[in-house]
Image (cartoon, rainbow, N blue to C red):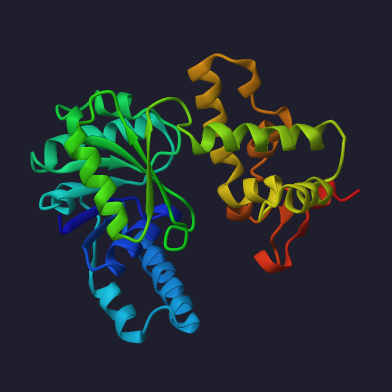
Amino acid sequence: MNNISVIGSGTMGNGIAHTFAQFGYKVTLIDINDEALDRAMATIEKNLDRQVSKGTLTTEDKQQTLNHIIRSTDVKTGVETADLIVEAATENLELKLKIFKDLNAFAKPEAILASNTSSISITQIASVTTRGDKVIGMHFMNPVPVMKLVEVIRGYATSDETTQTVMELSKKLAKVPVEVNDYPGFVANRILMPMINEAVFTLFEGVAGVEEIDTVMKLGMAHPMGPLQLADFIGLDVCLAILKVLHDGFGNPKYAPCPLLVNMVMAGKKGVKSGEGFYNYANGLKEAKVADKFSN
């Protein structure tokens, strides 16, 4: 398994491409236009420079990593030689189903089709293909080059062979793969998102402020980042989408998203990606301060 294609060059997609390329795999990074790919490659180079400055990579390693990545705006030609295709598009069911229909038609029969989805059913994704045994979830964590976990999600029809291949491949990327079954939210987000949602409710109901909630969880529970700051980092729109999947999938009101979270997303306050969520990031991540909306 030498040729990897990655669909989507956003935060997760460029991180996945970076990681595979760093470990010597030939990567085709695919997106809808050159502008998106230009941004992705600039991000990858910036992150590689950070690794060089920390001494974890040499300048030669950096250049080799960049040399391992080619770009494409055409899905058909971008995946035709791939042994593994990792879809890292927006967390939208209709979009993912369309992509997997195309991958099923364009990829070689033996290729494994993986999704980086954080909540959408692998079984449902596989249902639009004729190779359910070769469809699997590879849920990387953000930032991909740094975070060790890969949630490996088995759909209803995913074969033992496909699962084992992906588990071993993840280890070759210096990751720790954890096999889980295909139920809404899998493990990571089934546990994480209700915690984030409860933190938003705690703010919404006036129990405590943004910094106070995050400080309690950091100092009291040894979390490296408070839940509201983490929600900003993930993207409030992504958190909302995952909570909707959990709510729809289980039909349990405990997963219903907090009205404050819904309103913030509708208002365009999506966290780091939009410059403001529970915190304001106008001066950068390290200088983040509580957003004016919550500072009183």
Q: How many marks?
A: 0
Q: Nearer the viewer, residue 159 or 142?
A: 159
Q: Residue furthest bottom?
A: 59
> Residue sitting at 39 percent across and 30 percent down?
93
Tell me residue 85's x, y (percent). 23, 47
Q: Quadrant location of residue 173?
A: bottom left
Left or right of 262, for residue 295: right
Which residue of the protein is positioned furthest toward the left in this rendering?
A: 109
Above or below, 21 relative to 244: below
Q: Nearer the viewer, residue 48 or 30?
A: 48
Compared to residue 169, the image places residue 239 above or below, namely: above
- Residue 279 in view (yes/no): yes
Q: Nearer the viewer, residue 214 or 231?
A: 214
Residue 277 in view in this figure: no
In front: 292, or 44? Answer: 44
Task: Residue at 69%, 60% (x, y): give it.
Answer: 281
How far across and how far down the image is residue 117, in percent? 40, 39
Q: Is residue 69 above or below residue 82?
A: below
Q: Quadrant of the N terminus?
A: bottom left
Measuring from the top left, give residue 8's x and y in whole percent.
Answer: 34, 50
In the image: residue 279, left or right of residue 15: right
Farthest residue, direction right: 296
Q: Residue at x 56, y 48 (%)?
A: 234
- Provide residue 74's location: percent of width, then percent of height: 20, 51
- Kindly identify the residue that appears in the image at 58 percent across and 46 percent down: 235
- In the rendered view, tell whether residue 245 sits above or below residue 44: above
For residue 137, which quarter of the picture? top left
Q: Residue furthest toward the top? A: 251
